[in-house]
Image (spheres, helix red, strand yellow):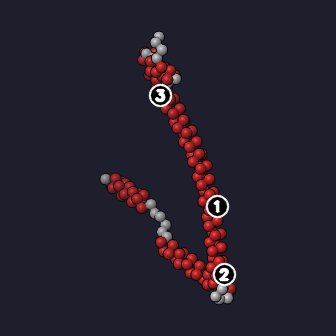
Amino acid sequence: MIDDPARSAGGTLGEYAYRDAGQRSMGEVVKDIISNVQDMIRSEIRLARAELREEGARSAAAAKLIGIGAGLALLAAGFVLVSIAQLLALVMPAWLATLVVGAVLGIAGMAMLSKGRAQFTVPKPNKTIDNVKENVEWMKNQTRS
């Protein structure tokens, strides 16, 4: 027999292509096809799991950096606010300077909360609701016919 690389390239799958059709029953062929499809699906699932694990590890590392950065930015904002209060304390009493800084922050915070509440909406699956209504109407029409 001639050495054909295509016969061995597919492993045992490559051998099936070169067998005579009369050697295998249709049941064996279907069984082999189903087995091969199952193996392919399992392999794809294993690959997807491995990719998700790798992506999850990268995302966790990024989230950690974002959290640390946000914490440091919050501390920096606090120090800037203390500095502003101390700067104001040069021209007015210290208690009044901190009160001014606190009042400005409070007013800004309340304005943002108010605007956020006004813009906040609970998401509704409008397309799904419309589809369900259509389906109910269709079923009503089917039962009337």
Report if the CB atoms under discs 1 and 2 are less than 8 Å apart: no
Residue at 68% in and 85% down: 94
For badge 1, the amino acid type reads Ile
Q: Is residue 96 above or below residue 141?
A: below
Cα distance in 3D space between marks 1 and 2:
27 Å
Position of residue 119 measured from the top left corner of the image (x, y, whole percent): 47, 72
Q: Are there few (<14), some (14-19), or many (20+) residues within 10 Å of tag 3?
A: few
Q: Residue at x 40, y 59 (%)?
A: 127
Tell which tag, 3 or 2, sits nearer the viewer.
2
- For label 3, the residue is 33
From the image, tell me which residue sits under label 2: 86
From the top left corner, tell me how far across and down residue 142 is, in percent. Answer: 34, 53
Is mark 3 in CB contact (under 8 Å) with mark 2? no
Q: How many marks?
A: 3
Q: Is residue 16 visible?
A: no
Q: Give the label, 1 or 2, closer to the camera.
A: 2
Could you tell which of marks 3 and 2 lies nearer the N-terminus?
A: 3
Sequence-wise, the earlier of marks 1 and 2 is 1
Q: Amino acid at mark 2?
A: Gln
SS assignment at label 2: helix
Compare residues 124 and 99 and report the one nearer the observer: 99
Task: Tell me which numbered mark, 1 or 3, is placed earlier along the sequence.
Answer: 3
Instruction: Inspect the image, locate mark 3, and give the three-letter code of the amino acid beneath it.
Output: Ile
Q: Is 142 rendered above or below residue 101?
A: above
**Which residue does the numbered mark 1 point to in the structure image?**
68
Q: Residues within 10 Å of mark 2 (few under 14, many from 20)?
A: some
